[in-house]
Image (cartoon, rainbow, N blue to C red):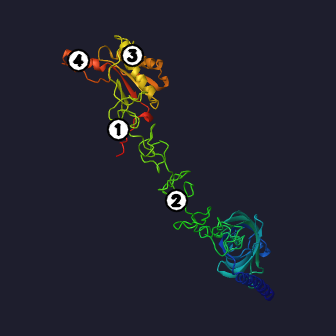
């Protein structure tokens, strides 16, 4: 009986040893797998199965077991584990001992993953069991399922069978066998899923996540600024994009030496390249300046004669251009708006006249610069805007001069008063008197469109009135300040100031 029991124990130990060896060999063969490791625990309750232990040793109450395991899983479905377990039966033996087995074991656990729910497992462990002062061969086996609640944590039910071998019948007539059920849990590192190699759609050696041209191989000339892309030539000018500073504009027949891939610019699009254009932002137009490449031939004085031909660029040719000097006005030495060629008195300021023998000669009216001077004032009724008849001749002379000089297109008639009376009254009076002169001239042959009237009251005296002036001097000053002035306001009609040719 003793020999058969020893044989059975040896057979069981051999089976468990073979399982452990198989697990170690499998883990060695799967050296490329990522290892999981961690801690497992079990808590359970059960009953003794052996009759002798139940009846003779009175281990017929509920037993408890608790186990802690350290494990390493070289492959996903198999782990090697080291366990410390304690089986405890609280009923005391007749000798007063409490039944318990402290086991130190090693074993294997087969644990295939079922989808993403959890792992079904079966394990076996064998080692040394300490029961009081005795040391016995101890093994156990378990079947269970752990639900994967988290990547690092799983828990579920387990049923475990335990067995302690007795060396002979003198120590105990039968082995100790018990069965328990409870919970098993695992705390451990998850096994990382094998990553697929990164995709390289265009097979150019650059993976898709880095490839900016996934469907186009980079070829023999990769673009240094765009990983995975070929260094193309977008404008087909022979300069690759990575160095072409004008990718969308071909360099053409006149490449810019300072900017690879760019043509020399023509900013104003006048056909003259910027490198030669002296007016980069202004097109040369239909009349290019022969002296300034790429520039238009302007007309600085707006007289219709282009600068390249204008001998008086800053002086308009005016109504009487000099036939001998393009763009220049005919000389007017006395500046009376009558050209010397038709001025009967070229060295004495006068006024235009329809009489050739009086044209430009001094008289009642003199054109001087922008002013039409009259040698007698315009008289009005006292404190009124009625023109006195004795002023008709001088106004007639002004009208004759204006009709004889149609080039004077605009004249300002300006009324002024003395300082007698209030400012507002004087301003209104001067305005009415100016308008009276405008009406008189327009009624006597001068186009109304050439005339405008303005009143300035006492604001522009010719001779200021000061305190302490003698009565006669004051009256004379007031008489001078009461006046009507005629001023040429059309710039085009201003007399030319160009000196006569020497």
The earlier-in-sequence mark between 1 and 3 is: 1
Residue labelled with disc 3: 392
In the depicted structure, whether residue 162 falls above or below residue 483: below
Q: Residue at x 60, y 66 (%)?
A: 253
Q: Tag 3 or tag 2, which sits nearer the N-term?
A: 2
The image's mark for residue 474 is: 4
Q: Residue at x 44, y 32 (%)?
A: 490
In the picture, the disc for residue 274 is: 2
Viewer-proximal residue, 236 or 301?
301
**For residue 352, side relative to residue 50 (left or right):** left
In front of the other: 441 or 184: 441
Residue 199, percent from left and from top: 71, 70
Q: Relative to 148, say whether 400 is above or below.
A: above
Query: Circle 1 — which element?
Result: loop
Q: Which mark's residue is nearer the viewer, 2 or 3?
A: 3
Quadrant of the rendered image containing residue 332:
top left
Decide which of tag 2 and tag 1 comes sooner along the chain.
2
Q: CA distance from mark 4 to mark 1?
A: 38 Å
> Separation of disc 1 and disc 3 at Cα?
31 Å
Q: Please state the horizontal and vertical placement of residue 27, each as a whole percent of the image.
A: 71, 81
């Amino acid at each position: 009986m003793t020999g058969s029991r020893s044989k059975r124990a040896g057979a069981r130990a051999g089976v468990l040893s073979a399982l452990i060896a198989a697990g170690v060999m499998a883990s060695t063969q799967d050296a490329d797998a990522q290892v999981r490791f961690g801690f497992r625990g079990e808590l359970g309750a059960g009953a003794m199965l052996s009759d002798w232990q139940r009846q003779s040793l009175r281990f017929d109450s509920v037993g408890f077991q608790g186990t802690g395991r350290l494990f390493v899983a070289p492959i996903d479905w198999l782990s090697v584990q080291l366990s410390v377990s304690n089986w405890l039966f609280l009923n005391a033996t007749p000798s007063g001992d409490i039944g318990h087995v402290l086991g130190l074991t090693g074993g294997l656990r087969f644990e295939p993953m079922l989808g993403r729910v959890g792992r079904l497992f079966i394990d076996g462990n064998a080692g040394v069991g300490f029961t009081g002062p005795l040391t016995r061969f101890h093994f156990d086996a378990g079947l269970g399922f752990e639900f994967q609640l988290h990547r690092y944590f799983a828990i579920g039910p387990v049923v475990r069978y335990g067995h302690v071998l007795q060396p002979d019948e003198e120590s105990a007539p039968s082995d100790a066998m018990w069965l328990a059920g409870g919970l098993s849990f695992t705390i451990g590192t998850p096994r990382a899923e094998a990553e697929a190699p990164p995709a390289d759609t265009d097979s150019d050696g650059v993976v898709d996540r880095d490839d900016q041209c996934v469907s186009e191989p980079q070829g023999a000339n990769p673009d240094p600024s765009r990983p995975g892309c070929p260094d193309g030539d977008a404008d087909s000018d022979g300069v690759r994009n990575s160095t072409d500073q004008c990718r969308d504009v071909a360099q053409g027949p006149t490449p810019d030496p300072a900017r690879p891939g760019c043509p020399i610019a023509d900013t104003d699009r006048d056909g003259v390249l910027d490198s030669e254009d002296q007016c980069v932002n202004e097109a040369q137009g239909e009349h290019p300046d022969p002296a300034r490449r790429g520039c238009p031939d302007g007309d600085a004085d707006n007289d219709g004669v282009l600068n390249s031909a204008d001998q008086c660029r800053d002086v308009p040719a005016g109504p009487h251009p000099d036939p001998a000097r393009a763009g220049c006005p005919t000389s007017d030495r006395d500046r009376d708006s009558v050209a010397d060629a038709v001025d009967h008195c070229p060295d004495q300021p006068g006024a235009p006249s329809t009489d050739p023998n009086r044209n430009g000669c001094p008289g009642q009216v003199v054109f001087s610069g922008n002013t039409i001077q009259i040698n007698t004032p315009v008289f009005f009724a006292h404190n009124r805007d009625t023109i006195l008849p004795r002023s008709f001749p001088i106004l007639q002379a002004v009208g004759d001069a204006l009709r004889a000089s149609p080039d004077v297109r605009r004249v300002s008639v300006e009324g002024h008063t003395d300082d007698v009376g209030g400012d507002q009254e004087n301003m209104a009076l001067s305005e009415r008197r100016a308008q009276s002169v405008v009406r008189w001239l327009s009624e006597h042959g001068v186009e109304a469109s050439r005339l405008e009237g303005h009143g300035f009251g006492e604001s522009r005296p010719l001779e200021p009135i000061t305190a302490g002036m003698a009565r006669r001097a004051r009256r004379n000053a007031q008489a001078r300040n009461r006046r009507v002035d005629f001023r040429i306001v059309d710039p085009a009609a201003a007399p030319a100031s160009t000196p006569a040719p020497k």
